[in-house]
Structures are given as structure tokens and as C-alpha cells.
Image (cartoon, rainbow, N blue to C red):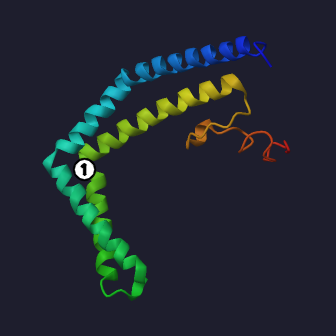
């Protein structure tokens, strides 16, 4: 084949490298954002708060008991006790201010990442599927064109 395809291959490779470098700059911007910084601060607080860590350990221990009880269902002798206790422990964990603040920061960071993903995907094409897990960003046809979704498009 000779040298005919090499310049095109070189251009594609250098374009790919440039795109990856731009992506790394975007990652750097996200990591330096206030949202990411606050997320890291909240994560640090979760890991270093003794009371929060006690609640996390208690939940993890209770979750193991819950999973054991689930294997036998309501026939397990500790079923009612474990089912009641897991709800209490989970609620205590969810009500922990440090955990609640971390979850909020985590959701804020996830929203930023979802928004960036949608912007990139829609810049390429409206039919590009971008998994966000957020119904706000879902396309109106519920699956993108070609899926046979409710918008009337078909494969």
C-alpha cells in the first residue's frame, strides 16, 4: 500500500491526542472547581468524624446481618429484630449531618458531571445516548432515535 495512507493516519492520531489533551484540561477544571473541592471536603469530614464513622460501622455490621437474614426470609429466627434494627440504623445514618452534607455535595458533583456529559453528547448529535441517571437530562423519546421509543422513531 505504500505511503498513501500514512498522512491521514498521522492526522487522525494527532487529532486524537489533541482531543485527549483537551479532555484532560476539562478534567483539571472540574477537579479545581468549587463543587469538586466541597465534595472532597465533605468526604474528608465523613472519613474523619468519629461519630459518623461509628454509625457507618454499625450500619455495615447490621447490613451483613440483614443479608444473612434475607437468605431465609421471614423464616429466619431473627427476621423481625433485624428488619426493625436495620431501618433504625439506616435512618440514624441518613440523619447524620456529616453524611447528609456529603450526599448533597455528591449529588451536586454528579449533576455537574451529568451536565458536562450532556453538553458533549448533544454537541455531537441530539441522538447520542448519554447515561446520566437524571430524568431531567433524558431525551423526550425515552431512549434516543433508533430505539423505537414513544417519539415515533424506529430502528
Residue 95 % position (x, y): 28, 52
Q: Residue at x 47, y 29 (%)?
A: 112
Q: Nearer the viewer, residue 15 or 60?
A: 15
Instruction: Classify 10 Å Cα crowding around label 1: few (below 14), some (14-19), many (20 and above).
Output: some
The reply, left or right, for residue 126 in relation to residue 81 is right
Residue 32 % position (x, y): 36, 20
Q: Residue at x 30, y 76 (%)?
A: 82
In this view, 87 is above or below 53:
below
In this view, 109 is above or below 3:
below
Picture mark count = 1
Q: Nearer the viewer, residue 37 or 20?
A: 20
The reply, left or right, for residue 75 in relation to residue 14 is left
Residue 77 % position (x, y): 31, 88
For label 1, the residue is 96
Q: Residue at x 71, y 44 (%)?
A: 143
Residue 11 % position (x, y): 67, 12
Q: Residue at x 37, y 27 (%)?
A: 35
Q: Quadrant of residue 10?
A: top right
Task: Say which element carries label 1.
Answer: loop
In this view, 116 is above or below 21:
below
Q: Quadrant of residue 144?
A: top right
- Which quadrant, please, contains the N terminus? top right
Q: Quadrant of residue 121?
A: top right
Considering every residue shown, the one lying at the far left of the view is 50
The reply, left or right, for residue 149 in relation to residue 128 is right
The reply, left or right, for residue 5 in relation to residue 63 is right
- Which quadrant, please, contains the C terminus? top right
Amino acid at each position: 500500500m505504500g505511503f498513501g495512507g500514512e498522512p491521514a493516519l498521522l492526522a487522525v492520531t494527532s487529532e486524537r491526542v489533541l482531543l485527549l489533551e483537551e479532555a484532560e484540561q476539562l478534567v483539571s477544571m472540574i477537579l479545581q472547581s468549587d463543587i469538586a473541592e466541597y465534595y472532597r471536603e465533605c468526604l474528608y469530614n465523613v472519613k474523619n468524624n468519629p461519630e459518623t464513622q461509628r454509625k457507618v460501622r454499625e450500619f455495615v455490621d447490621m447490613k451483613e446481618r440483614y443479608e444473612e437474614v434475607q437468605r431465609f426470609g421471614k423464616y429466619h429466627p431473627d427476621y423481625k429484630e433485624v428488619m426493625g434494627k436495620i431501618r433504625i440504623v439506616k435512618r440514624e445514618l441518613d440523619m447524620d449531618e456529616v453524611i447528609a452534607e456529603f450526599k448533597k455535595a455528591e449529588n451536586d458533583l454528579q449533576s455537574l458531571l451529568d451536565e458536562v456529559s450532556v453538553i458533549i453528547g448533544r454537541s455531537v448529535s441530539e441522538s447520542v445516548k448519554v447515561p446520566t441517571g437524571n430524568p431531567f437530562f433524558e431525551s423526550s423519546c425515552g431512549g434516543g432515535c433508533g430505539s423505537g421509543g414513544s417519539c415515533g422513531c424506529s430502528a
